[in-house]
Amino acid sequence: MGPLMGALSTVGGWAKSVTDFGLTIIMALIVVDILYPGSSAITENLGRVVDSFGNQGVAGLIVVLLFLVLYRRG
């Protein structure tokens, strides 16, 4: 059982690293889009995502809260 847990821990570490890298890229693109409007459509896309959660009502709120709980857990 030890090697399996080690492998899962390694894969989990990689997934966290990839997720952190993706969030860093998103934040950098937001800054670029604020400084140079229209250079990337990241702010419009994020607005659409937030709007779609808002249109879903309580179900959308539950999904956002679940995502936040899972993100802060790691």
Image (cartoon, rainbow, N blue to C red):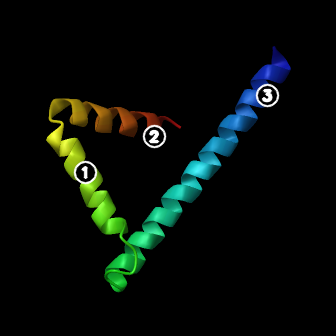
* Residue at left offset 56%, top offset 49%: 19
Q: Residue 74 in the image: x percent, y percent? A: 53, 38
Seen as rendered, the residue at the extreme right is 3
Q: Report helix, strand or loop for mark 2.
A: helix
Q: Report helix, strand or loop for mark 1.
A: helix
Label ID, residue 50: 1
Q: Amino acid at mark 2?
A: Tyr
* Residue at left offset 83%, top offset 18%: 2
Q: Amino acid at mark 3?
A: Gly
Label ID, residue 6: 3
Q: Earlier in the sequence, mark 3 or mark 1?
A: 3
What residue does disc 2 label? 71
Q: CA distance from mark 3 to mark 1?
A: 37 Å
Q: Residue 72 in the image: x percent, y percent? A: 44, 40
Q: Report helix, strand or loop for mark 3.
A: helix
Q: Earlier in the sequence, mark 3 or mark 2?
A: 3
Horizontal side of 33 relative to 9 (left or right) equals left
Q: Do residues under tags 3 and 2 come within 8 Å of each other at their CB atoms?
A: no
Q: Residue 28 in the image: x percent, y percent? A: 47, 71
* Residue at left offset 37%, top offset 67%: 42
Q: CA distance from mark 1 to mark 2?
A: 17 Å
Q: CA distance from mark 3 to mark 2?
A: 22 Å
Q: Quadrant of residue 5?
A: top right
Density class for disc 2 (Cα within 10 Å; few <14, some 14-19, many ≥20) is few
Q: Earlier in the sequence, mark 1 or mark 2?
A: 1
